[in-house]
Each structure stands twice: as C-alpha cells, then as structure tokens.
C-alpha cells in the first residue's frame, strides 16, 4: 500500500522496509507473543519517487533514512496504517515552504504618542484610586 504525501509525491510500497517486533507493556500472552510493534524505514537517498529539490530538503531534515515507529494499538495492521500516516505527515511538514522572514518595522511617531498617552492616562486612573494624603497634622 503506497504512502500518499501530496499530489506531487507518492512513496511506492517497494521503497518501504518493514520490521515487526513484540510491543512492550501489559497485555498478557498476546503482547508477549504477537509482533505488533511496527518500524517503518524509508531510504530517502535511494528513492526514485523524489525530485532533487525534495530529496535535498528531506535529507537536510532527516538524514539518509527516515525511521517511524508505531506501537499504539494491539493490531499490527492498525500500527502499519499509523506508521504510514506518520511518515506522510513528516514528509508533508518537511516539504512545506519555509515561512517568510519577517522584516522588522518601526512604530510610527503617532503610534508612539498614543502609547505614551495611554500610559499617562492609566497612571492618572491609578492615582485617583489612592487614598488622599494626610498633610493636616
């Protein structure tokens, strides 16, 4: 079953390497005997599905291979599905265009004045809340 990353990238099933081991934790005899933990490996460097740009971006982020592990459920089939979804999500996030750099801007003179006026008004409001000073001694 191929992994659909987006409309431009589909990872073929023969590019994926699967390993199955027993999952840890409680579960009795089933957990001790069944190989439900899934480890999915994908060789980015040798993948024919990728363009050079995609390959460069993915290797910069993950290295030569991507390893995804799933042992969420007691079913090997469901763990395989979860691992494929995680691989697709990882690749989708890594292939997104990086966010544009923010160009810092200076506040306008009017904005500075409004800020100072608001601070002054806030100070006046707090001053009015205080008890009057006693200078009649």
Image: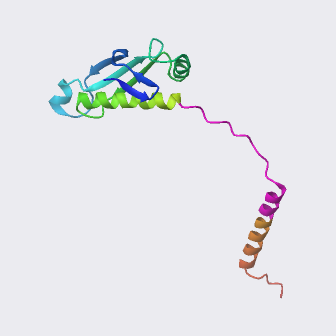
Height in image: 105 above or below 114?
Answer: above
Q: Is residue 84 visible?
A: yes
Most foreground residue, 124 or 137: 124
Q: Position of residue 132 (x, y in %)?
A: 76, 82
Q: Is residue 87 visible?
A: no
Per the picture, the main secondary structure of the magenta-coloured stretch is loop
- Residue depicted at 20% across the width and 34% down the height: 27
Image quadrant assignment for residue 111: bottom right
Left or right: 12, with 23 as reference point = right
Quadrant position of the N terminus in the picture? top left
Most foreground residue, 133 or 6: 6
Q: Position of residue 63 (x, y in %)?
A: 50, 18
Left or right: 39, with 109 as reference point = left
Q: Residue furthest left?
A: 29
What segment carries the magenta color? 96-116
Q: Is residue 39 magenta?
A: no
Q: Position of residue 25 (x, y in %)?
A: 26, 32
Color encoding of the figure: rainbow
Q: Is residue 111 magenta?
A: yes
Q: How many marks?
A: 0
Left or right: 64, with 27 as reference point = right
- Residue depicted at 30% across the width and 34% down the height: 72
Q: Residue furthest front?
A: 7
Q: Residue furthest bottom?
A: 136
Q: Position of residue 80 (x, y in %)?
A: 29, 27
Height in image: 20 above or below 86?
Answer: above
Quadrant position of the C terminus in the picture? bottom right
């Amino acid at each position: 079953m191929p992994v659909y990353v987006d409309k431009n990238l589909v990872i073929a099933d023969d590019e994926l390497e699967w390993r199955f081991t027993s999952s840890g934790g409680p579960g009795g005899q089933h957990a001790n005997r069944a190989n439900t933990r899934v480890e999915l490996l994908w060789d980015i460097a040798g993948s024919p599905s990728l363009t050079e740009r995609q390959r460069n971006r993915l290797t910069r982020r993950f290295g030569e291979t991507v390893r995804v592990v799933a042992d969420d459920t007691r079913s090997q089939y469901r763990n395989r599905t979860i691992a494929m979804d995680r691989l697709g999500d990882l690749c989708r996030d890594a292939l997104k265009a990086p966010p544009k750099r923010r160009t810092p801007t200076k506040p306008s003179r009017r904005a500075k004045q409004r800020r100072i006026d608001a601070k002054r008004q806030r100070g006046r409001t707090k001053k009015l809340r205080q008890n009057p000073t006693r200078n009649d001694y």
